[in-house]
Image: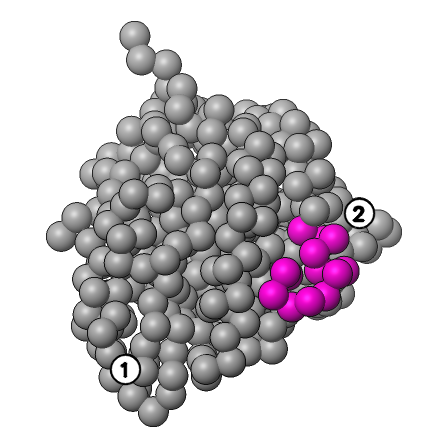
């Protein structure tokens, strides 16, 4: 008999090893950092991906703007392929970075192939498979332990996002940022162990019929990924928004039985906690994922400290992922759904 989650669970749990491997690999790819991130010829960096890879791209672009002070944007791969004049009009020099776990997704291949010979566009990528089609088209950073058997992305998402952020840190020349990325590796090992029983207990002891994920800055892409993760694994009704944006209409869906998960930043902490309190007043069960709990978080129904209060919000963003992925995993098990085999999905999307 097939054991539910036999691939997904160990892959979520192996994230710290995947981060370390990505960090070690990056030291061997300094030429990629020099040739692409530090190349002054590019006016803008465009990150493209599909599904989870697009959400990674959003977080990558946000961190790139903050740490490298460069113009950066993220688009679905299909937008660059089918609407190029809207995404990369021919008046600037672009570096286009494809993001793909497999390096085989049709849309990212079509997009990169359609622009690689244009004089104003240079292509590169990040993947977990060094021999993939994308790696043949574009020189890629490679997350060596990001490879997965499960359909849904877990450790691949975390390791690739971390690896690109670490590349930004090294390119910035800012030793504090480099140190922050090293701290993320150390923090993740303990966090994975804490997040597992926390998420299991939260799901098993409550009955939620709606899941809402809220985040800002580099964590907005993480919120979208959390939404997709639980939707893929367990088919529940879920949405994701920028934290303050949720107040502008979407909050009307909040009622008892709604789980609202807030990825609390330090930069916008007081504002985000006000939103959380408002949602609780409407009947939501509020879970706060925060660097450090305090008097201001005592109102919440549940709080998990993810650590890293001394590092930047951008570096901390990937540390929200273990808890969010375990929430999806245990919701699937509670609903008697195998997260290894999501309905209607395949690991690689081919057109």
Q: Neighbour class for label 2 at 10 Å: few (<14), some, many (≥20)?
A: some
Pinpoint residue 8: horizontal percent, then vertical percent. 42, 28
Q: Looking at the picture, does residue 76 appear above or below residue 41?
A: above
Q: Which mark is residue 119?
A: 1
Can you name the residue that lies furthest to the top here?
1
* Label 1 Cα crowd, 10 Å radius (few <14 / some 14-19 / many 20+): few
Label 1 close to label 2 by CB (< 8 Å): no
**Residue 196 among those drawn in magenta:** no
Compared to 37, does 21 lie above or below? above
Occupied quadrant, residue 219: bottom right
Residue 218's place in the image compared with 25, above or below, is below
Q: Give the range drawn in magenta.
A: 169-181
Residue 306 occupies quadrant = top right
Mark sitting earlier along the chain (1/2): 1
Q: Examine the rendering and report whether any part of residue 157 can be seen.
A: no
Question: Is 30 left or right of 2, judged from the image as shown?
Answer: right
Residue 94 in view: yes
172 inside magenta stretch: yes
| Residue 287 circle label | none
Q: Mark 2 points at which residue?
A: 293
The number of numbered discs placed on residues in the rendered structure image is 2
**Residue closest to the eye, 45 or 208:** 45
Q: Say which quadrant the N terminus sits in.
A: top left
Question: What secondary structure is marked by label 2?
Answer: loop
**Going 45% across and 82% down the picture, which residue do you hit?**
41
Q: Horizontal and vertical percent for residue 128? A: 39, 43
């Amino acid at each position: 008999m097939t054991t539910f989650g036999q691939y997904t669970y160990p892959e979520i749990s192996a994230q710290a090893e995947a981060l370390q491997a990505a960090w070690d690999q990056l030291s061997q790819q300094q030429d990629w950092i020099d040739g692409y991130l530090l190349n002054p010829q590019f006016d803008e960096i465009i990150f493209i991906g599909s599904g989870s890879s697009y959400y990674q791209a959003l977080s990558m672009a946000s961190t790139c703007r903050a740490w490298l002070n460069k113009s950066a944007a993220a688009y679905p791969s299909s937008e660059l392929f089918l609407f190029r004049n809207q995404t990369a009009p021919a008046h600037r020099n672009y570096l286009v970075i494809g993001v793909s776990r497999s390096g085989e997704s049709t849309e990212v291949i079509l997009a990169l192939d359609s622009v690689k010979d244009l004089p104003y566009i240079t292509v590169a990528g990040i993947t977990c498979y060094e021999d993939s089609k994308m790696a043949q088209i574009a020189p890629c950073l490679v997350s060596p332990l990001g490879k997965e058997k499960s359909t849904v992305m877990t450790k691949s998402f975390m390791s690739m996002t971390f690896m690109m952020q670490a590349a930004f840190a090294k390119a910035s020349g800012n030793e504090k940022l480099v140190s922050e990325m090293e701290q993320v590796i150390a923090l993740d090992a303990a966090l994975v162990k804490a997040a597992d029983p926390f998420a299991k207990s939260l799901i098993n002891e409550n009955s939620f019929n709606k899941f809402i994920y809220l985040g800002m800055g580099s964590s907005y892409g993480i919120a979208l990924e959390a939404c997709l993760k639980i939707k893929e694994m367990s088919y529940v009704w879920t949405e994701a928004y920028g934290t303050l944006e949720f107040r502008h209409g979407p909050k009307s869906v909040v009622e008892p039985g709604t789980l609202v998960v807030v990825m609390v930043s330090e930069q916008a902490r007081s504002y985000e906690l006000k939103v959380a309190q408002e949602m609780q007043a409407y009947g939501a069960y509020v879970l706060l994922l925060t660097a450090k709990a305090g008097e201001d978080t005592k109102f919440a129904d549940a709080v998990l400290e993810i650590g890293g209060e001394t590092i930047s919000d951008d570096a901390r963003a990937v540390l929200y992922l273990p808890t969010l992925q375990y929430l999806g995993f245990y919701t699937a098990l509670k609903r008697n759904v195998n997260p290894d085999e999501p309905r209607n999905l395949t690991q690689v999307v081919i057109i």
